[in-house]
Image (cartoon, rainbow, N blue to C red):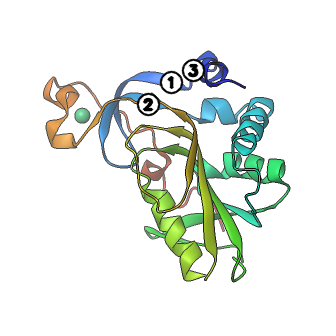
Amino acid sequence: MTDEQILEALQACNAVTKGHFKLTSGLHSDTYIQCARVLEQPRLTNELAAEAVARLPHDLKVDLVAAPAVGGIIFGYAVAAALDTSFIFSERSEGTMVFRRSFHIPEGANVLVCEDVVTTGGSVQELIKLVKDANAQIVAIVSLVDRGKKPDFGSPYFPLVTLETPSWQPESCTLCQTGQKITIPGSRSLAKNTIKP
Ligand code: ZN
């Protein structure tokens, strides 16, 4: 798939919406990337995951794909399937990113981290720390969409699509100043544990 075809696919399934949004990172924006519109289509998700894998360095050795819940789970799973590796996910427990469900990173494993949308990359950074704490190494980070904030993960980063959309600190948000109602679409705004143990 070309960059243009990927972008067309995202727009065709209405993954890019306009309004006034509070992002998971806490920043406000006039654009929200709702990857669920993509991920609810398994065939498209698998195609995008295969494309993301095809764009990785061909000599990259991956033992395990890990993703932060909830956003990264489906895409990470699809990427792991394309790579024919195992897949695990981390999730928040009382605000802290942890592995539950007996998910485990073997010492020395080559781990590929996957996320759906990266803005500041906070969840990815927390997952990277968990991987390093397990004495494993991050070989690369892959995202479906990057919002153009150029996060530094300290490892090679391969966003499939970069969509530079404006975002602001709440205190300097022009949409707040005009009194436009805000929507909080991110998963972190939902009940504390949307996934039951
Ligand atoms: Zn705002």
- Residue placed most toward the observer, 134 or 170: 134
Residue highlighted by disc 2: 32
Residue 14 disc label: 3
Q: Amino acid at mark 1?
A: Val
User: Is residue 148 found left or right of 105 in the rendered image?
Assistant: left
| Quadrant including the N terminus | top right
Secondary structure of the residue carrying tag 2 is strand
Which amino acid, mark 2? Tyr
Determine which residue is flagged by label 1: 16
Q: CA distance from mark 3 to mark 2?
A: 10 Å
Which residue is rendered at x = 61% and y = 82% of the image?
A: 134
> How packed is label 1: few (under 14 Cα within 10 Å), some, or many (20 or more)?
some
User: Relative to residue 145, is residue 179 depicted above or below?
Assistant: above
The kind of residue tagged 3 is Asn
Residue 192 appears anywhere in the view: no
Which element carries disc 3, helix, strand or loop? loop
Where the C terminus falls, by quadrant? bottom right
